[in-house]
Image (cartoon, rainbow, N blue to C red):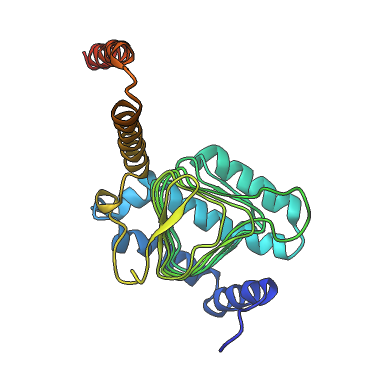
Amino acid sequence: MKEELTVEEQIEKIEHENNRIGLWKQIKEDFSVPKKNDPALNSNIELIFNYPGVWAIINHRIAHKLYKKNFKILSRIIMGMTQFLCNMDIHPAAAIGRRVFIDHGIGVVIGETTIIENDVLIYQGVTLGGVSLDKGKRHPTIKSNSVIGSGAKILGNITIGKNGKVGANSVVVCDVPKNCTAVGVPAKVIKRDCKNEKLNHSDLPDINKEMFEYLLKRVALLEHHLKKCDGIDLSKEDHDLECIYQKFISAMNSIKK
C-alpha cells in the first residue's frame, strides 16, 4: 500500500504543480473556475465586481510567491488589503492548489499551515482554523475534489479526505475519510463511498431533530412504565407540562407574526 505523503511532501507537490504552469496561467485558470461551478455567472464583467472569492485566491497566489521568497511583511500587507476588500482572511503561507473556488466567500478564514489541494469548493463562512498555539502543522488539510459547506468549521491538524464533503455549519475536529460526507456538531460521517455524489443539503439528515425525537420517545416509554408498574399518578405533572408546551407554541406563533 502506498504510504501517505508527509506534510512537507504534500506542500512540495502543490508548489511544484503551481510552479509548473506559472503564475499568470494559474491566475487565468482561477478566472475560468466560476464558469464551471456557478450557474449564476452570466458574463465576464461579473467576475470583476461580484466574485471576491476569485480575487482573494488570485491575491493569495501573488502574496504566497512573495512569502516563499521571504518578503513576509509585504505578503501580509497584500493579504491584509485583501481582507479589507474581500472580507476574507487567508494567510499567505497557506498552500493552495489549482482550481480552488471560494463561492461568495464572505467570512472565510484560512490559517497559516492549511493545505488545500486541487479542485476544492469552499462556500461562505468557512473556517479552516487551528486549536493549538504550538508551532508546526496546526491547521487542516483538504484533499482534492472536496466540498466544504457554508459556515463549516474545520479545526486543528486534521484531514478531509479526497472527494470528502462537509455539511453546512458542521464543526469538524476529527479526520473525515475519503469519499465520505460528514455533518453535525461535532461532525460525524453519515455517508460513505459517495465519490460521485453532489453535496445536497436537502438530503442530509437533521441530527438534532432525530435526537430530540429519540429523547421524547424514551421519556414517554419511561412514563408509561412508571404508570403501569408502580401505579404512579403523573396527571398533575402532565397538566403542568401541557401548559408549558402551549405557552411555547403561543410564543412561537407570535414571533412568526
Percent x, y of residue 106: 45, 41
Relative to 138, 20 lies left or right = left
Q: How many marks?
A: 0
* Residue at point 29%, 50% (across, down): 201
Question: In the rendered view of the protein, which quadrant contains the N terminus?
Answer: bottom right
Percent x, y of residue 53: 44, 50
Q: Nearer the viewer, residue 170 or 141?
A: 170
* Residue at point 62%, 74% (across, down): 10
Question: In the rendered view of the protein, which quadrant contains the C terminus?
Answer: top left
Percent x, y of residue 62: 60, 59
Q: Is residue 115 above or below residue 80?
A: below
The image quarter in which residue 9 lies: bottom right
Q: Nearer the viewer, residue 6 or 186?
A: 186
Q: Nearer the viewer, residue 198 or 225?
A: 225
Q: Is residue 10 above or below residue 204?
A: below
The image quarter in which residue 158 lies: bottom right
Percent x, y of residue 133: 76, 48
Q: Is residue 157 above or below residue 179?
A: above
**Residue that sits furthest to the front in the current view:** 230
